[in-house]
Image (tube, grey):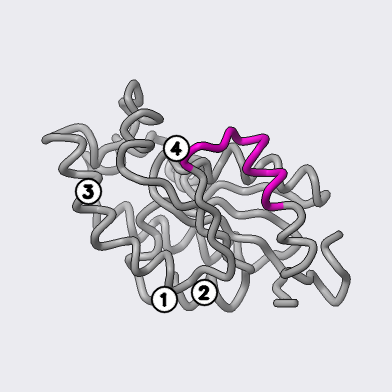
Amino acid sequence: MNPAPNLVMVGPMGAGKTSIGRRIAERFSLKFADVDQAVVQTCGISIPAIFEQVGEAGFRERERAALATLLAGEGQVVASGGGAVLDADNRALVKARGFVIYLKVDVETQLRRVARDRNRPLLLTGDRRQVLTELMEVREPLYLEVADLVLQADELTPGEATAALVGRLARQWQRSGVSAA
């Protein structure tokens, strides 16, 4: 058992952090929080607008603050942004305050899942495949560094991924001294 007050979902864009995270939260009667949504609510503008106004560095500062605020709580599933692991303090925080689930998907799956999405600033310029490949090369070792559990989610629907995670979480994660089951 690995005790932690929260579950944290990490992985690249299109991995299913939000859709699977919501289902896991419901299954374990936890609250659900999405870091990107928290940033949007705090700033009052969309993520592409944040990138346009303050750049990626400005977005990452807001992301760091939102993650810290959310992980100060407990009894929740937190879906992190795909790039949150780039910051060493964020990595330390998710390890300290969460049982970390890495939803692993390959670039082909990402391309399929985000094909029509125009709300991801990092994919608005350049070749999407190249961008996703380069992001994965940098981020994959960081996802693995923080992960307590890795789920290969390429061929799984959100329901199938949730079902696969429920049993593993019941065996591997303990919240506040009580089994997750």
Query: For mark 2, does the 10 Å Cα neighbourhood hold few (<14), some (14 to 19), or many (20 or more) residues?
Result: some
Q: Residue at coordinates 63% horizontally, 46% vertically from top-left?
A: 21
Residue 15 spot, x, y in % from top left: 46, 43
Q: Per the image, is 155 magenta?
A: yes
Q: Nearer the viewer, mark 4 or mark 2?
A: 2
Three-letter amino acid code of the residue under disc 4:
Gly
> Label 2: which residue?
93
> Label 1: which residue?
89
- Residue situated in front as seen by the camera: 79 or 23: 23
Residue 22 spot, x, y in % from top left: 67, 41
> Label 4: which residue?
44
Three-letter amino acid code of the residue under disc 3:
Thr
- Residue situated in front as seen by the camera: 54 or 30: 30
Three-letter amino acid code of the residue under disc 1:
Asp
Q: Which numbered circle lies on residue 172?
A: none
> Label 3: which residue?
133
| Image-quadrant location for residue 50 | top left
* Label 1: which secondary element: helix
Residue range (magenta): 154-165
Q: Nearer the viewer, mark 4 or mark 1?
A: 1
Label 4 to label 1: alpha-carbon separation: 25 Å
Label 2 to label 3: alpha-carbon separation: 26 Å
Q: Nearer the viewer, mark 2 or mark 3?
A: 3
Three-letter amino acid code of the residue under disc 2:
Leu
Q: Earlier in the sequence, mark 4 or mark 3?
A: 4
For the residues labelled 1 and 2, say whether their Cβ atoms are less than 8 Å apart: yes
